[in-house]
Image (spheres, rainbow, N blue to C red):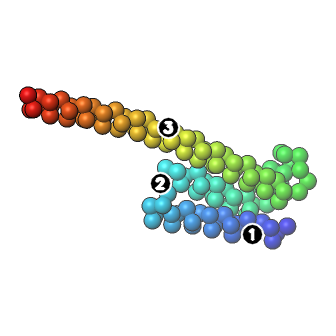
Amino acid sequence: MDRLMNVVGVLSVLLTLLVLLSVRRAHIRVEYSGSWLAAGVLLLALSRFRALQQWIASSLGLADAPLAVLMVAGALFLVVLYRSSMVISHLKDSNIALAQRVAILEFRLESLDEKTKAATAS
């Protein structure tokens, strides 16, 4: 089971580095990277501290500590993905509202343009 925890530790370090590189290259915004960084650091801590693994396993009523760590990791990523879905939904709603406002402004500009053409033609 130590091999599994080593793999989880390496993957959490890779996740953290990937997020930091993505922030540096402006592929992900800083405010959205916080939850991914927290997930990576938490997984690293869970994979390294045996006492924490045992405490989580006993709290969940599981005999196997690595199984408890994987359950916590799965739940953690579900929370991060849910948060991302909320942000995406909000952005979609904002884009729809913005498109509607642009359409209204275009209509007003076209109406104003027609009125000025009619006034200059008279």
Looking at the picture, does residue 4 appear above or below residue 65? Answer: below
Looking at the picture, does residue 96 appear above or below residue 75? Answer: above
Q: Which residue lies under the disc numbered 1?
A: 7
- Res 24 visible: yes
In x, y percent, where is residue 33?
A: 53, 54
Residue 97 shown left or right of residue 65 in the figure? left
Q: Secondary structure beneath disc 1?
A: helix
At label 2, the amino acid type is Arg
Whichever of labels 1 and 2 marks the residue nearer the N terminus, that label is: 1
Q: Do the residues labelled 1 and 2 touch (CB within 8 Å)?
A: no
In the foreground, 45 or 38: 38
Q: Check disc 1: other Cα within 10 Å, few if <14, some if 14-19, many if 20+.
A: few
In x, y percent, where is residue 7?
A: 75, 69
Q: Secondary structure beneath disc 2?
A: loop
Q: Secondary structure beneath disc 3?
A: helix
- Res 23 visible: no
Q: Which of marks 3 and 2 is in front?
A: 3
Can you name the residue that lies furthest to the right here?
Answer: 63
Q: Which residue lies under the disc numbered 2?
A: 29
Residue 49 position by quadrant: bottom right
Label ID, residue 93: 3
Whichever of labels 3 and 2 marks the residue nearer the N terminus, that label is: 2
In x, y percent, where is residue 42?
A: 67, 55
